[in-house]
Structure formats: C-alpha cells, structure tokens
Image (cartoon, rainbow, N blue to C red):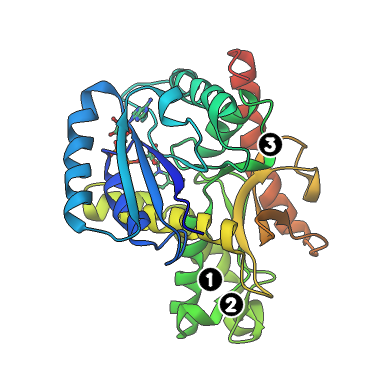
Amino acid sequence: STTPVTVTVTGAAGQIGYALLFRIASGAMLGPDTPVRLRLLEIPQAVKAAEGTAMELDDCAFPLLSGVDIYDSAEAAFDSVNVALLVGARPRGPGMERGDLLAANGGIFGPQGAAINKGAASDVRVLVVGNPANTNALIAASHAPDVPASRFTAMMRLDHNRALAQLAARAGVGVAAVSNVTIWGNHSAKQYPDIAHAVIGGRPAPSVIADDAWVADTFVPTVAKRGAAIIEARGASSAASAANAAIDHVRDWVLGTPEGSWTSVGLVSDGSYGVPEGLISGFPCVSRDGQWEIVQGLSVSESAQAGIDVSVGELVEERDAVRELGLI
Ligand code: NAX
C-alpha cells in the first residue's frame, strides 16, 4: 500500500536512536514497498539533537520516508501511531536503588502507555527496548487497558541474535545455518539462553555441539553477559546491534517468521511453561498473520525449567516491586 506507516521512536536522540532511524527510513524494518512517517519523541533538552538527526534523515533523501516530526509530548508523538519503539529510558545512576530505577521508569512508561491507549491506531504494535525492558513493557501495557496486552512486547532479540552468533562460531558454520534458539525469562544477566531445540545445519544443536560443559560454562554466560563485555570493549553500551535487533523484531512481527523457525520475544504470558500469567517474559515465538504466538509443547528438561524459573523469579520480583510502588 502507499499509505505511510507511522513509526514513533522514543529516545530518538540517543545512541540506539541514531543507529535505528536511518534503517527504518531505508525500508529495512517494514520492507521496500512501505513508506514510513517518523515521529521522534525526546525530552525537551534533547529536542535540538533530534532536530539534527532529522536534518540528516532529510539529507539521505530516502524514497520511502514521507516525513519526520519531533515531539516532547507523548500524546502528540503517539497520535495514530502504528509501530511504537520505546527506546528512551532512565538509566541506573550511581548509587541508585532498584526501587528508584523502577519508579523513574514508571514515570516514563506509565504516561507513554496511557498516550498509546488514547491515540494509537487500532493495529498498534509496541516494542520496549529501554531497560528494564520487560517490566517497562508491563507498566506501559497496564496503562493501556484498551489495547490488547499482546501488542506490548519487550526486546529479547538482541540476546537471541547473540546466541545464534555464538553457536555458529562454535560450530564453524554461518549464522544462517542456526535456528530455534530460545531466550527465556528476563532481558537481564539472569536470562536463560536455551539450545535444547536449536538446529544447526539441519541437525539438533546439542548433538552438533556435543559439549554440555561448554554450553553451561561458556555459552550461557557469554550470551547473558554480552552487554557488559560490549561496554568494556567499546566504552559505550550496545547500540547498532540493539537497533538491528529492534528492526528484526518488528519486521518478523509484521511480515512473519520464516516457516519452521522461531525467535525470542518478550510477550505477555498465558501461563505457558510455568510462567505466571500476565508477566512479560521471553518465550519462543512465531509470527503468523501479524501476531506473535508462543510455540507450545516443547519438552523442557528439569535443568532448563530451573533456569527458566530463576529468570522468571526475577520478573515476579520486579512486578511485585512496581505493584508496591503503585505503577501497575
Ligand atoms: P542513550 O542514553 O544514548 O539514549 C537514551 C535517550 O532517551 C536520550 O536521548 C534521552 O534524552 C531519551 N529519553 C530519556 N527519557 C525520555 C523520555 N521520557 N521520552 C523520550 N526520550 C527520553 O541510551 P541508548 O544507548 O540509546 O539506550 C536506550 C535504552 O536501551 C537504555 O535503557 C538501554 O539500557 C536499553 N538497551 C536495551 C537493550 C535490549 O536488548 N532490550 C540492549 C541495548 C540497550 O542497553
């Protein structure tokens, strides 16, 4: 169709925003036939920097980009939005307690959820990138009672892609040969990256890798702590890879996952795999007809269930904390 899709990006002047906007405008997210209208939401102090980014977007002369608008009000930025990428968040400052962090983010994601509830298009899809992503998504969803909870997702795709890359390197194959990894639970160091059902070159990953100690002692911590390793090496947190993961997530959501393979999505739980209903947890998901569905019926070993339960336990604690603070 030639009607532009309205895409709102929050934290647009930040480093992920800078890596994300140009790829959206180039067609990498919604395909080469879909024009996009970009709406950038920032805090007032960062509006000028967002204007600079908008100037550069103009200077790219992207054929698919039908306009760029900049806002410092959530209600205006989310009016008739189709795809909302919630990237801007309050980072943990020195000496900040977890409760303070959750409260500060509640002050951002609550009002943004309410603005989405008020003004978004009926097909709105929301991806929360800003950390703590799963709980921020829960807060936003709880302020949007008229939007189905399944439209609020949290980003597990960067962890998922990191896992694909680590497995491919270990097996000595290209990443395209690796599929069906799952990142369960929270997007945090307690996530549970799971290769039990992964496939490498058409064969079960556990038998290709054939090294349980490497999986437990190297693979899982490498994936779970990759964010910290990037900061250590680059002197700044993951930006281009995070933007790439957001593009992958929305593209698959809108256009579908390839037949026979799944990805990892932070999606509202229906109680599957022992995850309490209502939590936004990482699950194996396929996208069909524009909707995420949790892959059902996978066998889960005792040790895998223990790993899932630890990560889900952290989500329960975060939910209880934001409930206590009156944020949901
Ligand atoms: P930056 O600090 O570079 O940019 C954040 C931007 O958000 C700033 O420009 C700031 O002005 C803006 N902002 C703050 N409050 C806002 C509000 N209420 N409305 C609109 N904009 C607001 O951070 P960046 O490196 O871009 O990271 C953004 C977020 O992504 C962080 O919370 C980060 O922790 C999170 N990440 C999540 C990942 C994931 O896999 N889910 C991975 C990458 C990244 O660490």
Measured from the top left, where is residue 165 in percent x and y? 45, 71
Task: Name the residue located 64 percent from the left edge and 18 percent from the top edge.
Answer: 323
Give the mark toward the camera: 1 or 3.
Answer: 3
Residue 150 location, quadrant:
top right
Q: Which residue is mark 2?
A: 211
In the picture shown, does residue 168 fall above or below 138? Answer: below
Q: CA distance from mark 2 to mark 1?
A: 5 Å
Task: Name the residue located 50 percent from the left edge and 70 percent from the top edge.
Answer: 164
Give the mark toward the camera: 2 or 3.
Answer: 3
Q: Which residue is mark 3?
A: 149
Which numbered disc, 2 or 3, marks the residue that appears first in the sequence? 3
Task: Name the residue located 27 percent from the left edge and 59 percent from the top edge.
Answer: 62
Measured from the top left, where is residue 173 in percent x and y? 47, 85
Residue 284 location, quadrant:
bottom right
Task: Name the residue located 29 percent from the left edge and 55 percent from the top edge.
Answer: 22
Using a 10 Å C-alpha cutoff, classify the residue at mark 3 as few (fewer than 14 neighbours), some (14 to 19) or many (20 or more). Answer: many
Quadrant of the drawing holding the C terminus: top right
Residue at far front of view: 2
Which numbered disc, 1 or 3, marks the residue that appears first in the sequence? 3
Q: Are marks 1 and 3 in contact (CB under 8 Å)?
A: no
Dot 1 amino acid type: Trp
Q: Which residue is mark 1?
A: 214
Q: Quadrant of ligand 1?
A: top left
Dot 2 amino acid type: Asp
In the picture shown, does residue 105 fall above or below 7? Answer: above
Whether residue 167 is visible here, answered yes or no, is yes
Q: Are marks 2 and 1 in contact (CB under 8 Å)?
A: yes
Dot 3 amino acid type: Ala
Q: CA distance from mark 2 to mark 3?
A: 39 Å
